[in-house]
Amino acid sequence: MLKKLFYTFLAGCMLLSCTDDSYRGAEVGGVSDEPIPVQVVVGNPDNMFVTRGHGAVDENSEFWKGSPIYVYAFKKDLLTSFMSTSRNDNWNCLVDGSIDNRGSLAGKAAQIGELDSYATWAGEQVYYPVSTQPYDFYAYFIDDISVPDNSITRTDDRISFPVDIDGSQDLMSAKAAFDEGYYNLDGYSEEEKANLMNYSFGAYTAALRIDPVIYFKHHLTRLCFDLYSGYSESTGKEIYVDSIKVRSRTRGEFTVVSKHSEEMGLDFSRDTRPALLYDEAKNLTSEQRLPYLKLKDKNGEKFQPLYLPPSPEEIDPYNIYSVVEPVRAGESLLLAPDTEYELLLYLREHHKSGSISVGEPETFIFTAPGGGQFKPGYQYRIRLAIYGEMEIYMSVTLTEWNNGGEIEIGEDIPPSVSGR
């Protein structure tokens, strides 16, 4: 049946121009004669959530909300130029932002549905041309970052633009691939499956309800902060965490489309501003150094002072992570992947006498568990055992973002990290 459908579809394409704007109603082996719309599916949408500038797209939440994704689709051909726009050449560029905004170089905006996995296009609906021509689909997500059209560079081989992150924005991208695991292909022969792969994604596969599926990939490193109270009620004090900051590179180049898959993603290598901890940065202005990015609350608002309740008795630092329930501070920080980070922890102590002590922020330099680099698409738990301003312990735990499986690396004994 699939072979018959394929040859019937091909015959229909020979009768009509293959460069026609859309599929306009040729009978195709029992397929509806209605125009075939371009639809994009986002993989695992029921487990993803986002709010503008509020933090990470979290796989354990309910739905996407607020921010759009942006989609490109280009003719699957090594000679296709990514400089083509849909407004001027919709055979080579099937989908981009120029459909709705003349001259736009961005992808076409779409919203993720709250009830299903299909993206809803902003502006005009797009239809496939009458052809067996397949298209490559690319999508990217930039949270609430504004990207002016004049900052987007489109060449024959790639599409990219600069971004400047603030620690609260999740940046992702992906290219759709034919995934047998996603589609129900029971009953199809290997030859028929090969046809589906070769002609995906286009009118031929769309007629069989096989649409491009986007599995977004996170490009930033996520840090979450768990606080453990080590001081006891007998000390007669209360401890508040006023702020957490981490120094990070922020200026990156985001390549969202490329003929070379290894080029896709975020590149921060051009952000060569030094950090404060290095001697060459001591006499530079704040604008000339890498900035500190501030942890926000879960609602995306400014971090509010967090009360860290005392334990009934003082806890041994060697056992604190196993006997004390942690307090999660804020949402998370999304940073440029790096080999080390500098953290500032601002504490405030209230004493029974009524005095309040606010010292200099504690500074910590920490590296990735096991050495190497903090990886994009992974999250790390920064565990801080707090006894007072002058006694704080730190441990870093790696958690795979994609499946939630926690991996303990190194010894579980919290090393004391002295401030600078």
Image (cartoon, rainbow, N blue to C red):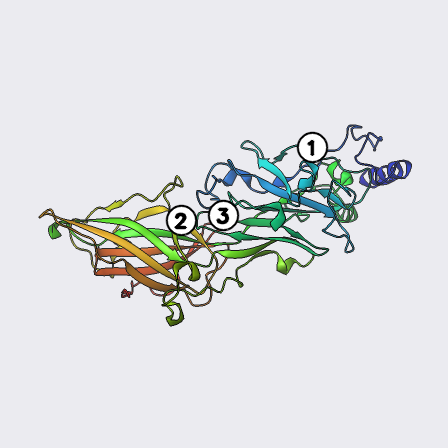
Horizontal side of residue 247 vs 40, given as left or right: left
Separation of marks 2 and 1 at Cα, in angstroms: 36 Å
Label 3: few (<14), some (14–19) or many (≥20) C-alpha neighbours in 10 Å:
many
Q: Relative to 354, is 414 above or below?
A: below
- Residue sitting at 44 percent across and 45 percent down? 55
Where is mark 3, residue-wise? Answer: 170
Q: Quadrant of the N terminus?
A: top right
Q: Secondary structure at mark 1?
A: loop
Going from the N terminus, do you reach mark 2 or mark 3 first?
3
Q: Residue furthest right?
A: 15
Q: Is residue 343 visible?
A: yes
**In this orientation, which residue lies closer to the viewer: 326 or 67?**
67
Residue corresponding to mark 2? 332
Judged from this view, the residue extending furthest toward the bottom is 279
The type of residue carrying mark 1 is Gln
Give me the disc on residue 125. 1
